[in-house]
Amino acid sequence: MTAAHTPEQVWQTILAETVEAVENEPLLASFLHLSVLRHSSFDRVLAFHLSSKLASAVMDARTLYEMYHQALKTDTTIHDAAIADIIAYYERDPACDAYSLPLLYFKGYHAIQAHRINHHLWLQGRKTLAYFLQNRSSEVFGVDIHPAATFGKGIMIDHGTGIVIGETAVLGDDISMLHGVTLGGSGKESGDRHPKIGNGVMIGANASVLGNIRIHECAKIGAGSVVVNDVPARTTVVGVPAKEVGKLGSIPSQEMDQTLS
Amino acid sequence: MTAAHTPEQVWQTILAETVEAVENEPLLASFLHLSVLRHSSFDRVLAFHLSSKLASAVMDARTLYEMYHQALKTDTTIHDAAIADIIAYYERDPACDAYSLPLLYFKGYHAIQAHRINHHLWLQGRKTLAYFLQNRSSEVFGVDIHPAATFGKGIMIDHGTGIVIGETAVLGDDISMLHGVTLGGSGKESGDRHPKIGNGVMIGANASVLGNIRIHECAKIGAGSVVVNDVPARTTVVGVPAKEVGKLGSIPSQEMDQTLS
Amino acid sequence: MTAAHTPEQVWQTILAETVEAVENEPLLASFLHLSVLRHSSFDRVLAFHLSSKLASAVMDARTLYEMYHQALKTDTTIHDAAIADIIAYYERDPACDAYSLPLLYFKGYHAIQAHRINHHLWLQGRKTLAYFLQNRSSEVFGVDIHPAATFGKGIMIDHGTGIVIGETAVLGDDISMLHGVTLGGSGKESGDRHPKIGNGVMIGANASVLGNIRIHECAKIGAGSVVVNDVPARTTVVGVPAKEVGKLGSIPSQEMDQTLS
Amino acid sequence: MTAAHTPEQVWQTILAETVEAVENEPLLASFLHLSVLRHSSFDRVLAFHLSSKLASAVMDARTLYEMYHQALKTDTTIHDAAIADIIAYYERDPACDAYSLPLLYFKGYHAIQAHRINHHLWLQGRKTLAYFLQNRSSEVFGVDIHPAATFGKGIMIDHGTGIVIGETAVLGDDISMLHGVTLGGSGKESGDRHPKIGNGVMIGANASVLGNIRIHECAKIGAGSVVVNDVPARTTVVGVPAKEVGKLGSIPSQEMDQTLS
Amino acid sequence: MTAAHTPEQVWQTILAETVEAVENEPLLASFLHLSVLRHSSFDRVLAFHLSSKLASAVMDARTLYEMYHQALKTDTTIHDAAIADIIAYYERDPACDAYSLPLLYFKGYHAIQAHRINHHLWLQGRKTLAYFLQNRSSEVFGVDIHPAATFGKGIMIDHGTGIVIGETAVLGDDISMLHGVTLGGSGKESGDRHPKIGNGVMIGANASVLGNIRIHECAKIGAGSVVVNDVPARTTVVGVPAKEVGKLGSIPSQEMDQTLS
Amino acid sequence: MTAAHTPEQVWQTILAETVEAVENEPLLASFLHLSVLRHSSFDRVLAFHLSSKLASAVMDARTLYEMYHQALKTDTTIHDAAIADIIAYYERDPACDAYSLPLLYFKGYHAIQAHRINHHLWLQGRKTLAYFLQNRSSEVFGVDIHPAATFGKGIMIDHGTGIVIGETAVLGDDISMLHGVTLGGSGKESGDRHPKIGNGVMIGANASVLGNIRIHECAKIGAGSVVVNDVPARTTVVGVPAKEVGKLGSIPSQEMDQTLS
């Protein structure tokens, strides 16, 4: 596949990949028609697919689908960020060689997009609904993101299981994160108490970043580390508690280098 | 909301919060009527809600609902502990500003209550059923608690994903635990092989406490730490393996201070 | 129960345990008849049970059941490995005192078997289907195994939540692993980039093993450790990053000793 | 089977027949355990079975089950009539050689019992709920009985499809009716406008009885007939419109003689 | 309730009746919120309710809901006829004392509206979809209407079970029909072969009208009759085969007089 | 379409029609792939489609699918008759212009095939299962056929709602029947008590044929008639009770002429 750059290119490439998948895999033909091919836009596919995953005995799929689609129509920045995230997976994850893979099969991607819409609901004052949907995402994806958390675009959460991101966390653009990462609070007092993550940061598997601290741009946090203090830009930290172990000359969220240096 | 102290106050406050939620959020009205408002008691709501979450293609929701309700009628200490847990979330979790939130939307809370009933079944000799339900909790909540584990009351498990608690673990009262915590065994021999956690203890995200050791009252275990030895009362331990880093003058499960000191 | 050694002994013991469970637990009788007793072979039970767990609104249970059963008929090594895994759980997990427990109630076991079939599909060139099913396993079991990963037999994954195993990982025989273990990649380049795990290795809870490194036979990795370099045979490593802390005279995957030495 | 006469005998015979069916038919074992064997009373089985049949995407099975069971506890005459109806099927329908057959497999029987409970709800003033459930019975059983219609006991509706019984219809005891029978109204005015059917009456397939007329005891109405006038006791009427064709010396609802004389 | 005349009055009355029903019947509150109160228009309620009833394991409720809603937006005459039909039930059926009853609980009404949309699909050339949906209506409602049949407005089908209406049947306005009515064809040749029913006609229960014949305006066909010849205006026919038995001075579809004269 | 004569031609034509339908109707693509295109034989499609329609909350679709497929493999005469029936619909029903229509969308056809398999189960002594499935067919299709009834091949039941066929009924070949037809018993005594229907017979809508009588070959029974005596070959009977009205020179089940002569 040629690299896709615009939202329209990404959408057309996803359609072409799906047509090919239907031909190659009859067992998925019904799923792919239902979820992708019969829809007229990327937004409808995303809304439909998320509603398939998050509907339950007590929350009708039609209701969710309509609500997701409405949110995507109302706030078009969600669409743009959802496309930027797909490109991020395609460029950074060596196991991702098609644009349709994150959209259809990566629960980290699903959890981010469910959160983007949930954040939109939160800003509209629909807190109970946002809590309800946070709970479903946590059950289905194993990813627990408070609806108030602020996300930039071009974010990749790989695998996703065990991710926890708190209420006052702020994520910049072009961040990569592996499963098990915690962006947690500092204590029982409410108020601004969660990390601020700069552009280009990479956070390794099962790392915990705790409190209202700042991880400056292009920093890297090693797997399994626990970070309770600010981390300077272009710096690698490792350990429990984490200590600085090196400096970086490239963008770690792009490189995805998991070595502890 | 005024703070609620008695079980009846908690129940009435939950009802009042739910009536308000129905008015503010039409999308949830059907869920809230079905799951809360049409029921005559807290026990019925809890039994119904858990059965909604744990029913499956091979385990009928009606069967689960009846069984949960029967257990709550038979062993009323479950009800009292379930209320004490709600109060614990309300007092300790800054993102929890309503009594209905843990009951309806926090999977850590759901997993604790499912375990309380499961433990009751285990004590009645219904081991196969308890294994079946442990498995469902593990699938749905990502929380894996052996039905024989003993729990006190006033327990808060925040977020929950990845929690594992073994067969001979014993938890006291007023304990707080974040996601990813393991209270694990020491080897392949059966017998008493899991941790004993004292009152007031706080265990940070992704920490592992392994073997038949004792975490004395009001100790604090830092995020990501691995503990294989006893921890004295009012002491903070951190690291892999964990080492003592400080002493505490307050109750860590109440403070929820996640700093590593 | 007498220990079972051959596949036929395991299957007959599972049937006998299930008949006893039906008598003791009427609430499970319908599930046990549907899932076990009415089937004519271990393969049918496994295919049926996995399809119950992984079916969804967009993937019909009949379709999955047929496909799983077909795979088990085509590649009989899956059957043998699935039996060897049951024996591994029975021998190594002190909470597992019946052969039917892993088959019916342990999601780590379910995730391994779903992967074995997924790997078979991958080798047949059915990549899209394998991605689809990897995603479902990740949602339902919280276990994310790339379909290309190679598994030996006699593997036990305890609890399972949070497990991530990458595309070029290779696991030998008789390995034990706890929940939260990552066998992760080293960066954004494709190619051989994940760990090779030798026979008899034991990996503790939440440990991360990163990059194309070799964990030699009968090594032990402590809980919460992060390993980025080769580990010699019969050696224990601990910490973030992990360091050698001792040598072993027995097979750690059999002993399941979680102490950090 | 020996004939059963008391409600307890009927219940015990049903249990015995079901135990035998489980042994003979493994494919139904899960259904029979779920629906019959695990329940402690006839009422619970009836409530559970009706709720299985009438639940839908918009009406939870648990809600229906609880409501049906509550109604059976509140009004014990429904239980007695439900037993009398089973005996009626057993004695009059040559294709019914077991007491469990109407309870489990005859939709005419299901429709009568759903109506009995619906009538109870109607008398309690729960009209909307009664309309909702009438609609479900009409969809599932093809039997449309207004919740206000009054039924005696010992009633058999064979096959059932197409039955329509209006608001002010009154049925005595020991009546037999085949499919397609209409007990309809006379016009658009409200008020007493439907037939009154005496004890022992038999109404053949697809017959229509229209208006506030009286079918006196032990009368017989031939298949396909349309009756718009009173019918004397012990009289057979046939045709469109129906005319008297003979007199009867036995009880037609017991004899089930479908000849037109 | 005051009589409603305009579509907007009918819609507002339905909403008011539903609000009242929620207050009086908690068991239906979830259904009524989900199906009525949360929607912004009559069309959405109709589309949602029909999709609840006709969705199945092989046809997703979201897909149906979208398709029904789209059809109602595209062809607004369906909306007008659907309202006229509600008024017809309210005015002619003495058991219908609320405008919400046909919309929510009368399967005859549901079958008519499902047909109106099906006819729209047929005219758009979507024949396979129309056959699919005809089949579902026939299963769920017991009403089998060929998608090519032409319907006027103000049509009431009471009860509905067993109705069959063929491909070239044409129904005028203000027609009333009871259950079991057949408007059938004359033979195996295709072409115009079904009845034409004039305005104001009333057809009694289980009557069959067969062949390309004309039932002129305000004629009445008695229950159980079989009609194979034209029927003049304002005439009652009865019997098998049907013969003229009287003349009418009023509109029989309004009077609903079921006597055979 | 060219007329198909052999089973293989019918199957290939059905596949070709379905491929075309997928292209023309995206809304059905998922259904048609799931139910038809991904299967390797007519038998699998029939087994899958019937199991989709008859599965329920208490009877798993996988179980039914397997059982139906097994029956079709065991008794290949069912396959042949199922094909002959499709040809019968195609030739006799002017609304049926494709071979896939009866298979996919005509519930009369579905009811016949469900009965054919049910009869096979009955002959194998699986009476309880056969009653269970008769009940489901009666609920879903509105067609109630006793599993012991004997059917020839080339049978068409048009529309189907309200059909009732009793235990000792015997149907020859090439019979056509409309909805609402009853082949009923004569009384409460067991034994041979239902009609015997000769080859080529046509029975009109809502006609009742009652008792152990013989309808000789190529007879025709008018709509709405009630027949309680033998009918000679090539004779038309009409009325309640039915009387001879004419003689026939052609095969009425082929002509489908519904006039009463």
Image: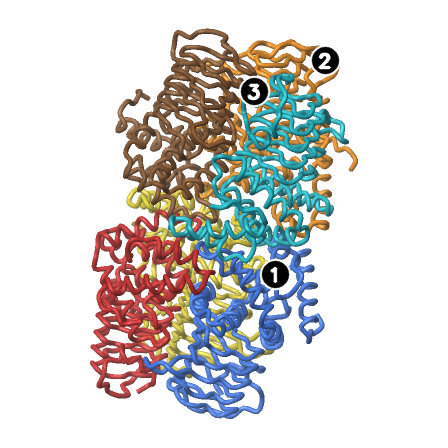
Chain colours: A yellow, B blue, C red, D cyan, E orange, F brown
The chain to which mark 2 is attached is E
Asked if residue B256 lies left or right of residue A38, the reply is: right
**Residue type at mark 1?**
Thr
Q: Which residue is mark 3?
A: D260
The chain to which mark 3 is attached is D
Q: Which residue is mark 2?
A: E248
Q: Is residue D13 above or below residue E189?
A: below
Pointer 2 with pointer 3, Cβ within 8 A: no
Pointer 2 with pointer 1, Cβ within 8 A: no
> Where is residue B173 drawn, in percent x and y?
56, 82
Q: Quadrant of the N terminus of chain F?
A: top left
Asked if residue C138 lies left or right of residue A76, the reply is: left
Label 1 or label 3, whichever lies nearer to me, is: 3
Q: Farthest front residue? A: D249
Label 2 or label 3, whichever lies nearer to me, is: 3
**Residue type at mark 2?**
Leu
Asked if residue D113 lies left or right of residue E125, the reply is: right
Element type where label 2 sits in the image: loop
Say whether mark 1 and mark 2 are on the same chain: no
Label 2 or label 1, whichever lies nearer to me, is: 2
Q: What number is the disc on residue A7?
A: none
To which quarter of the image does residue B194 belong? bottom left
The residue carrying pointer 1 sits among few (fewer than 14), some (14 to 19) or many (20 or more) residues within 10 Å by Cα, namely: many
> Where is residue C193 drawn, in percent x and y?
25, 67
Q: What number is the disc on residue A128?
A: 1
What is the spatial separation of the Cα atoms under label 1 and label 3, in whole angstroms? 67 Å
* Between F219 and C143, the one nearer to me in the picture: F219
